[in-house]
Amino acid sequence: MAKQKLVVIGNGMAGIRTLEEILKQKPEAFDITVFGTEPYPNYNRIQLSKVLQGDTSVSDITLNEWHWYEDNNIRLYPGETVTEIDKENKQVFTDKKRTEPYDKMIIATGSHPFILPLPGADKEGVTAFRDIKDCEKMMDYSNKYKKAAVIGGGLLGLEAARGLLNLGMDVDVVHLADSLMERQLDETAGKMLQESLEEQGMNFLLNRQTSEIMGDDRVTGLRFADGEELKADLVIMAVGVKPNVGLAKQTGIPIHRGILVNDYMETEIPDIYAVGECAEHRNVVYGLVAPLYEQGQELAKHICGTPGEGYQGSVVSTQLKVSGVDVFSTGQIVEDERTKAIRTYDDWNGVYQKLIIDEGKLSGAVLFGDTKDGNRLLSLIKKGADVEEFLESDRSDESAMDMIASMPEEELICGCNGVSKGTIVEAIQSQGLTSVEQVKGCTNASRSCGTCQSLVSDLLEYTLGDEYIKDQKEAICSCTTLSRDEVIEEIKEKGLKTTREVMNVLGWESAEGCSKCKPALNYYMGMLNPTEYEDEKESRYVNERLHANIQKDGTFSVVPRMYGGVTDSDSLRKIADAAEKYEAGMIKVTGGQRIDLLGIKKEDLPDIWRDLDMPSGAAYAKGLRTVKTCVGADFCRFGTQNSVGMGIDLEKKFEGLQTPHKIKMSVSACPRNCAEGGVKDVGVIGLDGVWEIYVGGNGGTELRKADLLTKVETSEEVIEYVGAYLQYYRETANYLERTSKWVERMGVDHVREVVEDGNQRDELNERMEVALSAVQEPWSEAVNNGTLLKELYEKVHVPTGSK
Ligand SMILES: Cc1cc2nc3c(=O)[nH]c(=O)nc-3n(C[C@H](O)[C@H](O)[C@H](O)COP(=O)(O)OP(=O)(O)OC[C@H]3O[C@@H](n4cnc5c(N)ncnc54)[C@H](O)[C@@H]3O)c2cc1C
Ligand SMILES: NC(=O)c1ccc[n+]([C@@H]2O[C@H](COP(=O)([O-])OP(=O)(O)OC[C@H]3O[C@@H](n4cnc5c(N)ncnc54)[C@H](O)[C@@H]3O)[C@@H](O)[C@H]2O)c1
Ligand code: SF4
Ligand code: FES
C-alpha cells in the first residue's frame, strides 16, 4: 500500500515531537515532508535563555540533528516558508515556489513575539527574543553597547535580563504591572522575586507604560506615558506572544485566538490538524512545551489509528530559569471565594509557599526560594488529590535519596515531558541505562528546560546504587561549575576569607550564591579555618541560625543537652518549671534520650534558655546531636564496661563540633547492643577488655548497618580513634553527606587505614583540637549577646504555618 503523504508546516518543538511520536507508533506509515522558516534543524527554543546566559552554546541545543531527518526518511526544507494552502486540491505552496501535495497535514507554526505598536519600534537596536537570530543579535549588541532595557517582566523578559547581565550590560526591566510575573505569581512571590533579582543587579521600573522608542535610526532610549525617559542602547520586547495563525486564516480554517481544534487536534477542515502554540483547544492557547507535547502525543495516536481518549487539556507549571532564584507556580495562583490557602512565609530565608485548596483538593501552588516540592504538587493537582496527601508527607529533613525513595511511582520527575519516577526507573532497569544522557534518550526526561537533570541523576543513583558513576564531576550548585574539592583547593591556595570573597574570586554566576552553596561554603570555610573564620549566620538554615527547631505551626522545640542520656532531679525540676512557664504544648522524651519541650514561642527562646541554664542539645545542628547509652556494667548483669561514662566522655568531648551533616553516637556495654550502635554514625560496643568502634550506620529510610572500624582497649583510645574518624569525615565529606554515604563512597578499609596510621591519627586529632577550641555554647552565646538577640529573635520572621 502506498504511503500517505504527511506534510508538517513548522520545524519547531511541537511539530517535531509529534513526528517522533508518530514514528514510534507507525514508522513506515507516512511519507513525511517538513517545512521550516528557520534555517536550522529542530532546536530547543527553551534553552535560548541558557545560551544567552552563557551556560550553553547554540551548537549544543539541537534536538534533532540533520541526520535524524535522513535516518527517518523525512524530507526537510529548512529556511522555507509555506505561503499558501490549497485545501481543495490538498497541496501547499512555498516562498521557494515549491508545491507539495498532502493526504494529511499538521500546522505547527508556533507563535510570533508580540511587538508593541510603538513609535520607533522598528529602529535598529530593538529586538524580540524568540529564536537563534534574536539571541545572536543580543550577544552581538552586548559587545558594542552598555545599556539594555527589557520591556516586560514576565518569564521571557527576566530570563533575557539575566542573560544580558551575564553579558556585562546594565539592565533595566520596564514592567506594566506592579509586581513581576503577575500571570504566574501572586504579589508576595512577585515582590520576593524582585528583591532577589535586584540583589543580582537588575533594576526595575514597575507600573510603566512605554509610549515611544527614542533615537534616530538606532535606539537611544524609551519615553514613558508620564513623560519620564530612560537611556538604552538595546531594547528587548518581551511582552507575550501571539499564535501564528495567518496561514490558517487565509485558508479559511476557523480561528479564534489560535487555530480551533477538537480533542484530536483536528481543525474543522478534514485532514488538517494543528498542534502547539498556534492551536486553541477548549478556549486555551498554551505557551509552554509540556502541554504541547501532550497534544502531540494525542495527535500522533489519532493519526496512526491508535485508540486514545484525545487531549483533555493540561495543568501547567512554570519555573523561571535564572540561577540563584527558585520560583515555581502551577494551577490557580490567586485565591477566590471558593478557595482557601495555606501560606508559609520565611522572610529570613526568603522561602514562601502558598497552596490553594478548592473543596479539600489542591488546585494551585506558588513556591519561592525552595521549589523541590514543585513537581510533586503538579502531580497531585493533576490527579485531583486531597491536600492532606501533600501535608501528611513531611520531607523537610530528607536527603536526596530519602526523598527519591519516598516518592510514589507516578510522581512527575520531568514536568516538561511528563515523565514519572516509575517510567524512568523501569527504563533504567529494563534497558540497562547508566547515565542521564541515556535516560534522556530513552524517556525524554530532562530533554527540554533541563531543571530536572539532578533529579534524574538521583534516580539513577537510587536505582543503580554503587554501579552508578556520575558522568560528570558534580558542581557544588548551579552558581558554579567547580566541584567541592576544586573550591576547597582554591580557598586554601588563594587564602579566601569569606563566602562572598569565594563567590567573587571564583566567578560565581550569582553574586549572592544560592540556598545550596551558601551553607556549604560557610561550613567549608569554618572547617578550613576554625579559629579565624567568623561564622556567617545568614548562610545557615533557619533552625541552625536560631538554635531551635521550627515546628509546623511556627513555634519551636527546645532540647537541652543531657550527656549520655543521664539526668538528675535538679535538671528535671528546671525542665518542668520551664515547660510550665513557657507553656510547652508537649513534653516528649526523644529517641536520643533527652527531653524535648515543644511549642515554645520564638520570642521566648532566649528566656527559656536563660531559665534552663543548660547547654543546647543541638537537636537542630549539623554536628554532634546525642550519645545514647545503655545502663552498662554498674547496673546491668550483662554489662562489661562503663557505657554511661564512655558516652558522657564522648559527648562532652565533641559537643558543639560542626560536621557536614548530623552525627548520632551510642555506647553499649555488651554485644546485646541496647543503645543500637549498628545504626549510628558512631556506635561503640564494650566487650571484656575491648571496645569495638562501628561507623557509618544509619537508621533512617535508607537503613545501613554500621561497619566495624577498629577495636581498642581503653576509653582514651576510643576518644582518639573517634576523634580522628570524625575529623577525617569533616575534612573530606561533601556538605550534607551523612557518614553512611561517606563511608560507602570512601570505603571503610580506606577510612580504617587512615585512622590506624599513628601519624595520620595524631595529625587529624591535632586539627580536631583546634576545631574544638573554637566551639562556643550557642544558647549562652545568644543570651549574652544583645545584638545577636535583637538581630535574630526580633528580626526573624518565621512561617506562620497552616491555617
Ligand atoms: C527564550 C525562550 C525560553 C523559553 N523557555 C521555556 C521554558 O523554560 N519552558 C517551557 O515550557 N517553554 C519555554 N518557552 C516556550 C517554548 O519554547 C514554546 O512553547 C515552544 O517552543 C512552542 O513550540 P511550537 O512548536 O508550538 O512553536 P515553535 O517552537 O515556535 O516552532 C514553530 C516553528 O514554525 C516555523 N514556522 C512558522 N510559520 C511557518 C511557515 N508558514 N512555514 C514554515 N515554517 C513556519 C517557525 O519559524 C518556527 O520555527 C520558551 C520560549 C523562549 C522564546
Ligand atoms: N521559563 C519558562 O517557562 C519560559 C521562559 C521564557 C518564555 N516562556 C514562554 O514564552 C512566552 C513569552 O514569554 P513572555 O514573558 O513574553 O510572556 P508573558 O505573557 O508570560 O509575560 C509578558 C509580560 O509582559 C508584561 N507586559 C505586557 N505589556 C507590557 C508593556 N507594554 N510594558 C511592559 N510590560 C508589559 C505583562 O504584564 C507580562 O507580565 C510565554 O508563552 C512564556 O510562557 C517560558
Ligand atoms: S547492652 Fe548489654 S550491658 Fe547494655 S543494657 Fe543492654 S544488655 Fe545490658
Ligand atoms: S522539567 Fe524541564 S526538562 Fe524536565
Image: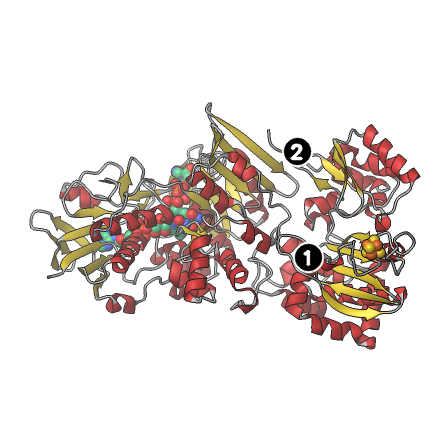
Among the 4 quarters of the image, the one containing residue 481: bottom right
Please indicate whether residue 317 sits to the left or right of residue 632 in the image: left
Q: Is residue 430 above or below residue 759?
A: above
Tag 2 or tag 1, which sits nearer the N-term?
2
Marks 1 and 2, how far apart at CA: 29 Å
Residue for point 32% across, 63% down: 64
Q: Is residue 755 above or below residue 179?
A: below
Residue 27 drawn at (x, y percent): 23, 62
Nearer the observer, disc 1 or disc 2? 1
Pick the residue in front: 284 or 171: 284
Mark 2: give few (<14), some (14-19) or many (20+) Cα within 10 Å. some
Q: Residue furthest top?
A: 337
Helix, strand or loop at mark 1: loop
Amino acid type for the residue under numbered disc 1: Asn
Please indicate whether residue 797 sits to the left or right of residue 220 in the image: right
Q: Which mark is residue 553?
A: 2
Residue 168 visible to the viewer:
no
Residue for point 78% across, 72% down: 755
Amino acid type for the residue under numbered disc 2: Asp
Q: How is the image coloured?
A: secondary structure
Q: Which mark is residue 698?
A: 1
Pick the residue in front: 462 or 496: 462
Residue 648 drawn at (x, y percent): 87, 54
Among the 4 quarters of the image, the one containing residue 212: top left
Q: Contact (CB < 8 A) between labels 1 and 2?
A: no
Mark 1: give few (<14), some (14-19) or many (20+) Cα within 10 Å. many
Residue 165 visible to the viewer:
yes
Please indicate whether residue 394 sits to the left or right of residue 207 in the image: right
Helix, strand or loop at mark 2: loop
